Image (cartoon, rainbow, N blue to C red):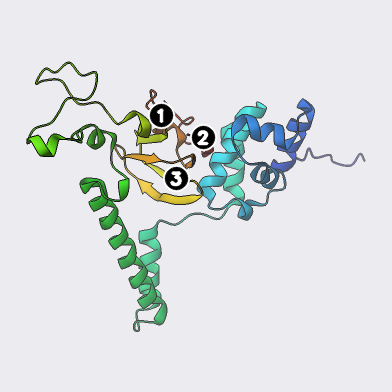
Amino acid sequence: MRPLRFDVMPALGEEFRSAREARGITLSEVAEQIHIRSVYLNAIENEEWTAIGAPVYVRGFIRTYARFLGLDAEDAVGRFNESAPAERPASTASVSLDEREGSGLSIWAVLGALVALALVGFVVYEYWQYVHGGSGRVPVAAATAAPQPGAAATGSQTPAPGASGSPSAEPSATPASTARHQIAIRLTQRSWLRVSIDGSTQLEGIYPAGTSRTFTGSVADVRAGNAGGVTVALNGRPPAPMGKDGDVVEQRYPL
């Protein structure tokens, strides 16, 4: 009798590596084109998912890399989901913790409550900063409403240079010296976002649609968990999305 023969599907990481090598390109070349660091691309090809981070980031990287190589992105994500541990919502995790600690509060429950209070305080502080324009991180709209120098002395706003002088004319957006080194970020969809200016992290967390921030510096590093919902405007130019919906993109912007 002839032995039975089974066709074995190649591993997910090996399929990515084979597709890339068939194109004759290196990981560094791919990283430059899709704006994903080569260390993460190498982790995908070796299926080292923990080196990338949370499963939501892994799915975004897999989807972007697969589209670039001409592979079926949703099939690749589905194969990853079959092997990845299921994610539990934070509320479910909290309920499970309460059930396990039903006999009394433990040190971990106390620490968890303290961390939750700290996070709530941080969110409230960020919102207050957003509303009142603290720490220099103000929306673009708030910056345009700022009075020009000399307005306080006269008791009324002085039109910006080049303005029409009509009472209905709006002041200029920002002084030219500041606008040359600004990055304005606005969320059109809910997204995780991290912004570092000159190597210092200024913003990190999950923010709703409509969130708007303006930063000033020399170099901005921006990482978005939903690139299609994040627009970036450099030095007063028109805003542009960082990428496609659901993609995880990290980009450096010289200001």
Q: Residue furthest right?
A: 1
User: What's the CA distance linking mark 1 and mark 3?
Assistant: 16 Å
Given this view, does label 1 or label 3 mark the residue nearer the observer?
1
Instruction: Return the x and y of residue 242 as percentages of the image width and height.
Output: 47, 31
Tags 2 and 1 in contact by the CB under 8 Å rule? no
Q: Nearer the viewer, residue 82 or 216?
A: 216
Q: Residue at x 12, y 31 (%)?
A: 157
Q: Residue at x 45, y 47 (%)?
A: 194
Query: Residue 113 falls in which quadrant of the image?
Result: bottom left
Q: Quadrant of the N terminus?
A: top right
| Amino acid on which the number 2 mark rests in the picture | Pro
Q: Residues within 10 Å of mark 2 (few under 14, many from 20)?
A: few
Mark seen at residue 195: 3
Secondary structure found at label 2 = strand
In the rendered structure, which amino acid carries the disc numbered 1? Asn
The residue lying toward the viewer, choosing from 173 and 72, is: 173
| Dot 2 or dot 1, earlier in sequence | 1
Image location of residue 125, percent across then percent down: 27, 57
Give the residue at mark 2: 254
CA gap, disc 3 and disc 2: 13 Å
